[in-house]
Image (cartoon, helix red, strand yellow):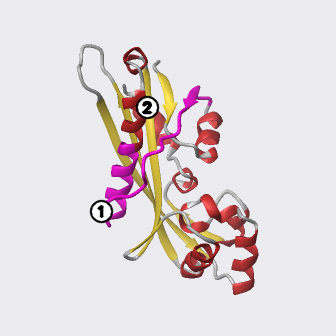
Amino acid sequence: MNKIILASASPRRRELLLQIGMEFEVIPSKTEEKTGSLIPWEMVLELSERKAMDIYDSLPAEKRMESLVVGADTVVSLGNKILGKPGSYQDALDMLTLLQGRTHQVYTGVTVIYLKEGDEGPSRISFYEKTDVTMYPMSGEEITAYVNTGEPMDKAGAYGIQGKCAAYIKEIKGDYYNVVGLPIGRLYQEIKRL
């Protein structure tokens, strides 16, 4: 099996890969997380591919031959509004105020870039998963207390379903791990086919 390189600094993505026993190396992409699209699934596919290509391009030729580079990106969408990671304390408060008591969508795009033997350029697999998440209503005090934990600051939509915010998750439809940040079952199945 080729060596997996995770093009992400996300501790949650690392934990998920470890959880299923995958061996991998982490080389975080430093590419800018901006896109021209306002369509959630297009955004996450574009950004996941950009992250994976950033790392693939930085590898020496011999390492490209033996590696599968995995890029991923997650956004939260409520109606036409896209919620990435909060840029400030106030952003986190605003995002949670918007999400509380409502159903929103979480999209994660994943791109795997690899070099097939005999090919000159890289091949890629890209896919996205969408999960519907319904939150219980939260009071202003509950939102403030949660933001004060610091947990929301590096997470799309300003919450971690696997953390303290679990107390406010009413229902999910779709892949739970997608909401954590990596649809690990789908990723494993796609890699297995290579």
At 54% from the left and 51% from the top, the residue drawn is: 181
- In the image, what residue type sits under mark 2? Val
Q: Secondary structure at mark 2?
A: strand
Picture coordinates of residue 177 (x, y %)?
56, 50
Q: Which residue is mark 1?
A: 37
Q: Amino acid at mark 1?
A: Ser
Residue 57, how many percent across, how many down? 36, 30
On-image quarter of the C terminus: top left
Magenta range is 21-50
Q: Which mark is residue 113?
A: none
Magenta-drawn stretch contains 24 = yes
* Side of 140 where 8 appears, left or right: left
What is the crowding at mark 2: few (fewer than 14 residues within 10 Å), some, or many (at least 20)?
Answer: many
Q: Which residue is mark 2?
A: 69
Q: Can you give x and y, in whole percent of width and height, for residue 102 in the image?
A: 53, 79
Q: Front-most of 103 and 122?
A: 122
Which of the two discs, 1 and 2, labels the residue nearer the N terminus? 1
**Is residue 57 shown above or below 100?**
above
Relative height, residue 183 to residue 34 (above, below): above
Rendering quarter of residue 159: bottom right
SS under mark 1: loop
Judging depth in this view, the residue of 22 and 123 nearest the camera is 123
Q: CA distance from mark 1 to mark 2?
A: 23 Å
Question: Measuring 32% from the left and 67% from the top, which residue is drawn there?
Answer: 38
